[in-house]
Image: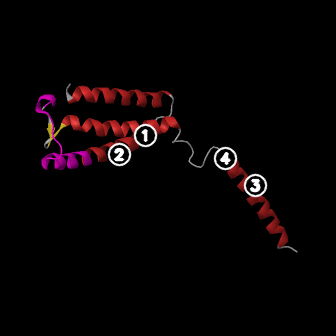
Amino acid sequence: MSYWALNAIFLAVVAAVALAAIVTRRAPQWASVAVALAVVLLMTAVFDNIMIGVGLVGYDEAKISGAFVGIAPLEDFAYAVAAVILLPSLWALIGGARDRRGPHASQTNNAHASANTVQTSTSKGTGDA
């Protein structure tokens, strides 16, 4: 099995999760994902070239496409793409993108607003006496 065939399996799962996030209208902010992807791809290019250059990681020449970024095979970048798309899509699907103050935030904020109104009203009245 080539590295691209292996990548296709992972990328198909990632695409399915991202599509589920889009269909349920819980998709992440794609502009933020694009910025993160650019940063992660740059870091992958730098560190993969270092790891391959020092002999920490090697690839079977018969299983790579022959396209490289430096000395890193292009196939190696699929994992970075998968992670950057999968994680925010999963986060959106499991509800991490909801209001971070919790499910009862609006009730709590209304209670605080009411308390502040009452406190302000009573403090104005005490100054006149």
Disc 2: CA contacts within 10 A as few (<14), some (14-19) or many (>=20) = some
| Mark 2 residue element | helix
Residue 88: give its label: 1
- State the extent of the magenta-drawn residues as a range: 43-65
Location of residue 75 (image quadrant): top left
Report the residue marked by disc 4.
106
Report the residue marked by disc 3.
114
Three-letter code for the amino acid on which mark 1 is drawn:
Pro
Mark toward the viewer: 1 or 2:
1
Q: Earlier in the sequence, mark 4 or mark 3?
A: 4
Three-letter code for the amino acid on which mark 3 is drawn:
Ser
| Mark 3 residue element | helix
Whole-percent x and y of residue 21?
46, 31
* Marks 4,3: beta carbons within 8 A: no
In this image, 9 relative to 3: left or right?
Answer: right
Disc 3: CA contacts within 10 A as few (<14), some (14-19) or many (>=20) = few
* Marks 1,4: beta carbons within 8 A: no
Q: Earlier in the sequence, mark 1 or mark 2?
A: 2
In this image, 5 relative to 70: left or right?
Answer: right
CA gap, disc 3 to disc 2?
Answer: 41 Å
Residue 36: give its label: 2
Give the residue displayed 15% in from the left and 29% down from the top: 63
Q: Earlier in the sequence, mark 1 or mark 3?
A: 1
